Image (cartoon, grey):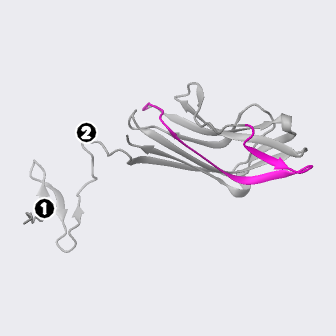
Amino acid sequence: MASILNVDQINNAAGTSAVTLDPSTGKASFPNSVTIPNGATMPAGSVLQVVQEGSSADSVASSSAWSDTNVSLTITPSASSSQVLVAITVVQRVDGSGTIARGGYRIVRTISGSATTVVNTEGSLEHIQSRGSAGELSGIGHYSYLDSPATTSSVQYKLQMALNPDTGASAVRARASTYGTNAVLMEIAQ
């Protein structure tokens, strides 16, 4: 037979009320905000914090050099062992005068303003393309990456883009003003 403990209230060491149980629902109420004691850890896989941001400004690149879009988010991990899940959705477009015009997008990371590191391997200039004699191709791009920044300093993630001039591309765009973009960072406990 299982043991049962019936209580209405749990006091702290000083004898003041810390937790009160509602007799009709069994739910606990706390007199002040709940705090996690020092040294407590969340189980691996727990989401520790979420940062979300959208952009309403278009970005345009007309060079094969990678340039920043208007999609940029910053997070400060609570533990150096944490991973950060980066998820970005953007309406992308490539303009071109040839039968095939190509461009691409990639995610980069900067820790405390130091050197920028490419974190996803999808950043190819072959990634999106346009077909037609003077056409454009628009589509929704979803970019995600589970990063291990190994820091508790501020970490900035950006979406970059570039075009491939060898394919007749004239511009690559992130169409935020018309369709919006969405970017989310989630710190995951390890």
Q: Position of residue 107 (x, y in %)?
A: 61, 38
User: Which region of the structure is painted magenta?
Assistant: 125-152
Badge 2 marks a residue whose secondary structure is loop
- Give the residue displayed 71% in from the left and 35% down from the top: 67
Task: Identify the residue at the far bottom of this view.
Answer: 24
Depth order, front residue of 135/1: 1
Q: Position of residue 86 (x, y in %)?
A: 54, 44
CA gap between label 2 and label 1 equals: 24 Å
Quadrant of the image for the C terminus?
A: top left
Which amino acid type is shown beneath numbered disc 1? Gln
**Picture layout, residue 43 above or below residue 166:** below
Q: Position of residue 132 (x, y in %)?
A: 89, 51
Q: Which residue is mark 2?
A: 38
Which amino acid type is shown beneath numbered disc 2? Asn
Depth order, front residue of 98/11: 98
Query: Any mark on residue 166, and which?
Result: none
Residue 6 sits inside the magenta stretch: no
Residue 145 sits inside the magenta stretch: yes
| Residue 180 located left or right of residue 183 | right
Depth order, front residue of 19/2: 2
Q: Residues within 10 Å of mark 2 (few under 14, many from 20)?
A: few
| Residue 188 located left or right of residue 13 | right
Q: Quadrant of residue 77?
A: top left
Q: Position of residue 182 (x, y in %)?
A: 61, 52
**Picture layout, residue 157 above or below residue 116:** below
| Residue 48 located left or right of residue 98 | left
Q: Quadrant of residue 106?
A: top right
Reading the chain from its start, which is encountered first: label 2 or label 1?
1
- Give the residue displayed 58% in from the left and 25% down from the top: 115
- Give the residue displayed 80% in from the left and 52% down from the top: 137
| Residue 164 located left or right of residue 143 | right
Q: Which residue is mark 1?
A: 9
